[in-house]
Amino acid sequence: MSGLPVTMRAWRSAEPGLHALTLADVPCPRPDQGHALIRVEAAALNFSDQLMIDGSYQIKPPRPFTPGQEIAGTVITSGEGCALHSGQRVCGKVFWGGFAEYAAIRGDMAIAIPDGVSADSAVALPIAYTTAMVALTESTQIVAGETVLVLAAAGGIGLAAVEIAHALGAPVIAAASSTEKSALAREHGADKIIDYSKDGWSSKVKDLTDGRGVDVIVDPVGGAATKEALRALAWKGRLLVVGFASGEIPMIPANRLLLNRAAAIGVYWSHDRDAEMVARVTQRLTSMLASGAIHPHIGAAFPFTQLPQALAALTERRSTGKVILTLKDVSS
């Protein structure tokens, strides 16, 4: 593969913690069979990146490694058996290696970016929007007239869930913790807003639903928020467990599920086990993105050289929507 860059700049994690992240020159990857080499233009951050850097995620790459799981950019070249072609604009999920100028991606994990959509917007699709779509259309299916409560509604997955639930025709109650975040959720399709930083906020949800409660809860938070949200669950309601951004895995009171004939459903997916489902979800998402039914919000875009600052903004919840690194002025 002559003409490809020999080296590239990439962030490296040699030991746990943000303090150990370094920007280094490393060999540029070469695409194996079924893979393509991407010139990265945008890389999105996720809470799982911090966990992987800390060594507390279920995937533990051998150190030193390059973190980053969500990328968007342009195909440079493809390996044998990969249908992606040079010049194609794609986004996709990688297991790690995304916080770099170039990254190798499996062809079946790449999503073609619709015409007119920027890499900055498309980079939110592979994890945040895919997870929200899996939650609301595969883990459960919203029935006409059902109400959806979204926790952390101004975050990456939360805002995606607000948009998707709204696009599916469901009334949406957004749980947010500030005036700014509430306004953002409403701008993206939320019908009603509650401040879930206040004690006993589930009673407000009941008031907004005439005492009935909500049919579906999208919960990327965990901890105390999960337990309080369960108080607002309606008869035959479903709690969709998406993640634990609070850092606390809740002990779900099973009596609340029993008394409401309700269900707690874990939202988890992979390209290997769920290939057909992911293909369905991807098709729906790209159609919605192309039509303008969804429009990802980039709350903060950091230069490539500021990954530690970007991760701090994400983990300290000083951002809304997606936090990304932009590499447009770096890669060549």
Image (cartoon, rainbow, N blue to C red):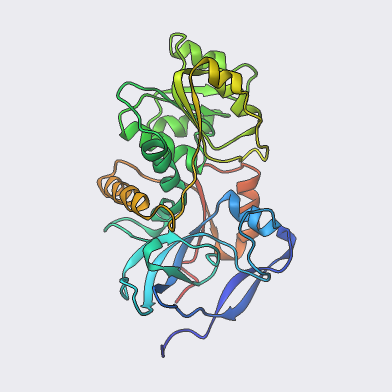
Q: Is 79 on the left-hand or right-hand side of 193?
A: left
Q: Quadrant of the N terminus?
A: bottom left
**Between 246 and 332, the one nearer to me in the picture:** 246
**Between 38 and 244, the one nearer to me in the picture:** 244
Q: Quadrant of the C terminus?
A: bottom left
Residue 225 percent location from the top left of the image: 61, 28
The number of callouts visible is 0
Question: Is residue 5 shown above or below 138?
Answer: below
Quarter of the view holding residue 292: top left
**Between 274 and 199, the one nearer to me in the picture:** 274
Question: Is residue 106 shown above or below 213?
Answer: below
Quarter of the view holding residue 137: top left
**Between 155 and 220, the one nearer to me in the picture:** 220
Residue 231 percent location from the top left of the image: 56, 18
Question: Is residue 329 shown above or below 242?
Answer: below
Residue at position x 39%, y 42% from top? 133
Residue 41 percent location from the top left of the image: 44, 65
Residue at position x 54%, y 15% from top? 259
Question: Is residue 114 shown above or below 236?
Answer: below
Residue 195 percent location from the top left of the image: 56, 23
Q: Is 33 on the left-hand or right-hand side of 260?
A: left
